[in-house]
Image: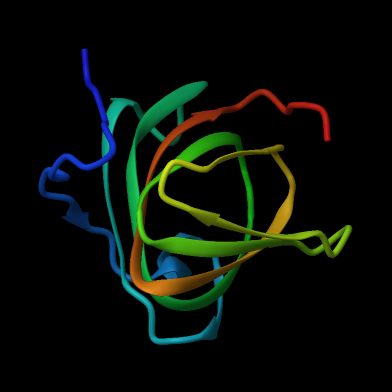
Amino acid sequence: MFHFKLNEQIFALDDWGSPSDGGAEIIEGPIRQWGKIVFGNLEGDLHAGLYAAGKGQFRFEYPYSEHSTVLEGSVTLTDLKTNERTTYQKGDSWIISKGSNIRWHVLSERVVVSYLGSAVAVGS
């Protein structure tokens, strides 16, 4: 079992390069990202772990559905289809459906989230 708790030290994350390495478009940067997959893999039906991104902005079209909770920092996510914009801070969560086009604007030096990704599209 893995647990991610608010106000606990986050274990070491792997350097994942730039969000553009995963298909994102950098809007304001350069940006670095880090993470650790603790369950499954990106090619499977289900994967989970931690993801972190440095300050800046990028656009990403989600190839999977995702539930995330902020463990550190703050980020504003904008759904580019509806233009809905929400700022998330430590303890806040979101659900994003597969195929959504989302702009990330990391407001703090970095944001860290725990996430669960699924190949199944969820309702929007």
Residue name at image x 71 percent, y 37 percent: 97
Residue name at image x 44 percent, y 86 percent: 29
Q: Residue furthest right?
A: 82
Instruction: Tell which of 49 and 46 is nearer to you.
Output: 49
Q: Position of residue 14 (x, y in %)?
A: 17, 53
Residue name at image x 12 percent, y 43 percent: 11
Q: Position of residue 25 (x, y in %)?
A: 58, 74
From the viewer's perspective, tell me whether residue 73 is left or right of residue 20: left
**Quarter containing the N terminus:** top left
From the viewer's perspective, tell me whether residue 11 is left or right of residue 118: left
| Quadrant hosting residue 4 | top left
From the viewer's perspective, tell me whether residue 41 is left or right of residue 8: right
Residue name at image x 37 percent, y 61 percent: 73
**Can you say whether 98 is above or below 107 in the image?**
above
Instruction: Tell which of 13 and 106 is nearer to you.
Output: 106
Q: Position of residue 113 (x, y in %)?
A: 39, 46
Number of numbered tags placed on the structure image:
0
Q: Position of residue 99 (x, y in %)?
A: 74, 45
